[in-house]
Image (cartoon, rainbow, N blue to C red):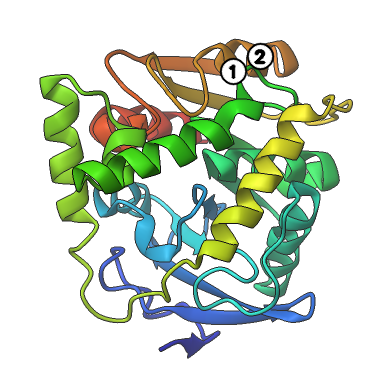
């Protein structure tokens, strides 16, 4: 169940209490959740990972951001309760993020792109560089990044392994199998169930397949020139199975002024495993 766009005078303070709202733009209705500070600063727009909906955000990751700013978690076209046909290339996904941002009356935002969301964020920087002030790219890579064309195979094999071993695929894909990684996976899965009402619609297999096609296309492309020169923070795990750590260097080649933070004994879910360090680092980065 969703609420239509409304004023922000009663904006909730945290993810669990944020209602699911809708905004119409570019011929579709997009679901989103917003919460956080009323300080009037630049909002933080966050885009989630492959195969995810609005409920896939970790409350302990996004809530600390909301202490200092307005946070908007935006759904993708055709994913969850958002209408339209799911996209299979990031050029279209980026346009589908830019349109709702403008429909919400925003002219400047910060971006937080997680995994696939980081690929969408990079395309937003190409299409609308003046829209973005600061950007955080977590567990992602540039066009043509090392190993990105192998993500489909890695993901599918790991999902099958999860089915055979009765293990949630994100546990295997996002976390290392060390004691620290196993414990992080366990607590992460528990936090995803903290929100019990007003949940988003499940992600369908068709969405998953389309997004994997988009990643594969991205991995085969050559990065175009970029005009974005704003502050950037790159976050990565040193043992990421889905997006190899070499992508952090590839991003730094593309954005040489970016700050890079690599987390030890961390996989693709590094921002969930190291959420306190991540939010401390990212909050300092986002401060004006």
Measuring 51% from the left and 18% from the top, which residue is drawn there? 244
Expressed as whole percent of the image width and height from the top left, the position of residue 196 reads 20, 75
Q: Is there CB contact under 8 Å for labels 1 and 2?
A: yes
Q: Is residue 33 above or below residue 136?
A: below
Labels in figure, total: 2
Dividing the picture into quadrants, the one containing residue 39 is: bottom left
Q: Is residue 31 above or below residue 229?
A: below
Q: Is residue 191 left or right of residue 36?
A: left
Measuring 71% from the left and 74% from the top, which residue is drawn there? 103
Q: On the image, numbered disc 2 is attached to which residue?
A: 250
Expressed as whole percent of the image width and height from the top left, the position of residue 65 reads 37, 47
Q: Is residue 276 left or right of residue 138?
A: left
Nearer to us in this view, 265 or 159: 159
Dividing the picture into quadrants, the one containing residue 272 is: top left
Nearer to us in this view, 258 or 68: 258
Measuring 64% from the left and 16% from the top, which residue is drawn there? 146
- Confirm whether residue 205 shows in the render: yes
Expressed as whole percent of the image width and height from the top left, the position of residue 85 reads 70, 72
Q: On the image, numbered disc 1 is attached to which residue?
A: 247
Q: Quadrant of the N terminus?
A: bottom left
- Confirm whether residue 279 shows in the render: no
Element on which disc 1 rests? helix
């Amino acid at each position: 169940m969703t609420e239509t766009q409304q004023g922000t005078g009663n904006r909730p303070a945290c993810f669990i209490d944020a209602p699911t709202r809708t905004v119409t733009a570019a011929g579709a209705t997009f679901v989103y959740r917003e919460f956080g500070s009323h300080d009037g600063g630049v909002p933080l727009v966050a885009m989630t990972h492959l195969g995810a909906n609005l409920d896939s955000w970790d409350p302990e990751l996004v809530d600390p951001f909301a202490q200092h700013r307005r946070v908007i978690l935006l759904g993708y076209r055709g994913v969850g309760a958002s209408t339209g046909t799911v996209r299979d290339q990031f050029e279209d996904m980026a346009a589908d993020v830019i349109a709702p941002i403008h429909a919400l009356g925003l002219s400047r935002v910060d971006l937080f792109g997680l995994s696939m969301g980081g690929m969408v964020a990079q395309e937003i920087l190409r299409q609308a560089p003046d829209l973005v002030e600061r950007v955080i790219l977590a567990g992602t890579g540039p066009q043509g990044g090392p190993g990105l064309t192998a993500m489909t195979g890695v993901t599918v094999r790991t999902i099958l392994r999860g089915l055979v071993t009765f293990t949630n695929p994100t546990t295997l894909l996002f976390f290392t199998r060390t004691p620290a990684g196993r414990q992080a996976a366990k607590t992460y899965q528990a936090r995803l169930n903290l929100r019990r009402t007003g949940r988003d619609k499940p992600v369908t297999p068709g969405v998953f397949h389309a997004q994997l096609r988009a990643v594969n296309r991205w991995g085969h492309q050559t990065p175009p020139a970029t005009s974005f020169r704003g502050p950037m923070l790159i976050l990565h795990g040193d043992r990421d199975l889905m997006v190899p750590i070499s992508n952090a260097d590839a991003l730094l080649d593309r954005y040489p002024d970016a700050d890079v933070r690599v987390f030890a004994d961390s996989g693709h879910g590094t921002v969930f495993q190291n959420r306190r360090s991540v939010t401390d680092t990212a909050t300092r980065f986002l401060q004006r």
